Image (cartoon, rainbow, N blue to C red):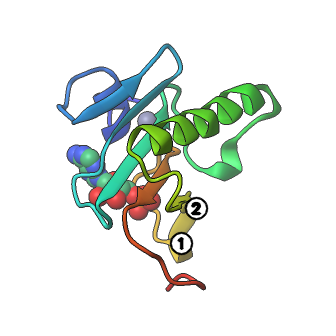
Amino acid sequence: MSDCLFCRMVKKEIKCDVVYEDDRVLAFRDINPQAPVHILIIPRKHIETSLDIKEEDASLIGHIYLVASRLARKEKIDKSGFRVVTNCNRDAGQAVFHLHLHLLGGRSFSWPPG
Ligand code: AMP
Ligand code: ZN
């Protein structure tokens, strides 16, 4: 989608701090980090929210989680622990309507989340 911020990052129209990419996903550092490690992992394909994931996306979603685990190891937050979050719609505070996983780590998090 031409007016989607994350699609524009996929197309390299907007610069971002890429930490990993392959034919299906792009991962980059969040511009407003909420933890020492805060990486966003997105599918290259435009999917608006987690409600829009289709059966045909099952392998893609699995792949995104595998990338999150690999990046957690690479960033050395695997042993201490990390959080993987997807916000969906208003009450969760979703701001960018292109599916993304937040990979957060490097500090401890409270539960339940605020
Ligand atoms: P969400 O609230 O789950 O939709 O998260 C959107 C995230 O995108 C926020 O954590 C923002 O800080 C992040 N973000 C917005 N614009 C950019 C950008 N240009 N580069 C990197 N991260 C961004
Ligand atoms: Zn998009």
Look at 33% across and 55% down and name the residue there: 37
Left/right placement of residue 70 relative to residue 15 reads right
Disc 1 residue crowd, few under 14, some 14–19, many 20+, Cα 10 Å: few
Q: Position of residue 25 (x, y in %)?
A: 49, 26
Query: What's the distance in space between the residues labelled 1 and 2, CA to CA?
Result: 6 Å
Asked if marks 1 and 2 touch (Cβ < 8 Å), the reply is: yes
Look at 52% across and 51% down and name the residue there: 78
Residue 84 quadrant:
bottom right
Residue 86 quadrant:
bottom right
Tell which residue pokes out farthest to the top in this image. 23
Q: On the rendered image, what quadrant is the N terminus found in? A: top left
Residue 16 quadrant:
top left
Vertical order, 5 against 78 (above or below): above
Left/right placement of residue 60 relative to residue 32 reads right
Look at 54% across and 62% down and name the residue there: 87
Look at 28% across and 61% down and name the residue there: 36
Q: Position of residue 11 (x, y in %)?
A: 31, 20
Tell which residue pokes out farthest to the right in this image. 55
Residue 4 visible here: no
Judging from the image, what secondary structure is the residue with disc 1 in? Answer: helix
In the rendered structure, which amino acid carries the disc numbered 2?
Cys
Q: Where is residue 109 in the image (x, y as percent from the top left)?
A: 47, 77
The dot on residue 92 is 1
Tell which residue pokes out farthest to the front in this image. 79
Q: Where is residue 73 in the image (x, y as percent from the top left)?
A: 48, 41
The dot on residue 88 is 2
Quarter for ligand 2?
top left
Asked if ligand 1 lies within 8 A of label 1, the reply is yes
Vertical order, 29 against 60 (above or below): below
Left/right placement of residue 92 relative to residue 12 reads right
